Amino acid sequence: QGTGVTVLGLGAMGSALATTLLDAGHAVTVWNRTPARAVGLSARGAEAASAISVAVTANELIIACLFDHASVHETLDPVVAELRGRTLVNLTTTTPNEARELAAWAAEHGVDYLDGAIMATPPMVGAPEASILYSGTREVFDAVRPVLDRWATSTYDGEDPGLASLFDLALLSGMYTMFAGFLHGAAMAGSAGMSATDFAARATPFLSAMTFAFADDARVIDGGDYTVAGQQSLDFSDLSHIVRASEEQGVEPAPIAAVQELISKQIAQGHGAEAFARIYESLRADRTDS
Ligand code: NDP
């Protein structure tokens, strides 16, 4: 029998986490605000706790996979005294500062805390292709790692408890911006009658092939020299013709117009001959332009 684990929150993700632990032979206690959601897991051998206080005192290791930061406090504030001396791994999506706040709250109450960010969908849980990022106390990560590794490839990102959330959200920012670009392209093609399905068939190989450029841009950014040879210049990257084409077709240009705005800003500052990657300078946290 593996380590006993309590799982709080039996939505799509919490249920997948609990099921994977049960399948691996752990004794699992589950709790959900709406008790009916625990029925299926009980049938598979989980212990359904009748109250949150019962759930958090059943095991040393408690996993929270609730809705958001507020729901973690709503659930755990009333039982914080019972949590003392136990380990809380919070897999609920939060912002970095919300994760830091929860870590400070846990420390104040004598609770060992690790924050996690799940880079997977529920059906992926339990497979090595799934990835979960963790940050917070290294000793806590090392101690609970055998359980964490049941779900996914576990990555430890550092002592700052906000880092797992930050890196998760950084990747999602890239993903959603790319999706918005795809949808804008689909609307442009759609203005001439192409179905979104046909556009997707063309966009998938093209956009996938373009991702090699991430590493090139990264080398320029990390090297700190945007005049380095072999880069596409900002002048060459002027996208006003795409914005115009979008408008001519009656398509809202917002996603591509946002990119053009970043390019124009760098050109206006006299950097037109430098690499496209220089728009990073208009985005970075310590940027000097406004
Ligand atoms: P669901 O919407 O399926 O489930 C939400 C869960 O949160 C339910 O158990 C719900 O309980 C509970 N909940 C909501 N509000 C409260 C509250 N105020 N107090 C107590 N419990 C509450 O969401 P998921 O399971 O998909 O997601 C859970 C977390 O995992 C989220 O933070 C999400 O961002 C994260 N995540 C999800 C992924 C996914 O693909 N699903 C991917 C990566 C991260 P009740 O049944 O009573 O409503």
Image (cartoon, grey):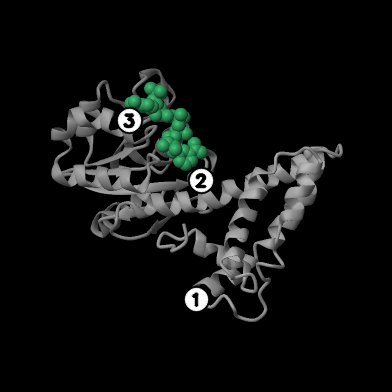
Which mark is in front, 1 or 3?
A: 1
79 displayed left or right of 180: left
Q: Residue 108 shows which numbered tag?
A: none
160 displayed left or right of 42: left
- Ligand 1 is within 8 Å of the C-beta of the residue at disc 3: yes
Distance from disc 2 to disc 3, alpha carbons, whole Å, reads 21 Å
- Quarter that holds the N terminus: top left
* Camera-nearest residue between 97 and 153: 97
The spot of residue 90 in percent (x, y) is 32, 42
Quadrant for ligand 1? Answer: top left
Distance from disc 1 to disc 2, alpha carbons, whole Å, reads 33 Å
- Ligand 1 is within 8 Å of the C-beta of the residue at disc 2: yes
* Camera-nearest residue between 116 and 94: 94
> Which kind of residue does numbered mark 1 sit on?
Gly
* Camera-nearest residue between 130 and 47: 130
User: In what element is the residue under mark 1?
Assistant: loop
153 displayed left or right of 192: left
Instruction: Look at mark 1 in the image and give the residue it sits on.
Output: 224
The answer to which of marks 1 and 2 sits earlier in the sequence is 2
Instruction: Look at mark 3 in the image and give the residue it sits on.
Output: 71
* Neighbourhood count class around disc 2 (C-alpha, 10 Å): few under 14, some 14–19, many 20 upward: some
> Which kind of residue does numbered mark 2 sit on?
Ala
Q: Residue at x 37, y 50 (%)?
A: 148
Q: Residue at x 53, y 44 (%)?
A: 124
Q: Residue at x 65, y 74 (%)?
A: 273
User: In what element is the residue under mark 2?
Assistant: loop
Q: For residue 250, what is the image quadrant?
A: top right
Q: For residue 63, what is the image quadrant?
A: top left
Instruction: Look at mark 2 in the image and give the residue it sits on.
Output: 120
The spot of residue 276 in percent (x, y) is 62, 67
Q: Residue at x 59, y 78 (%)?
A: 227
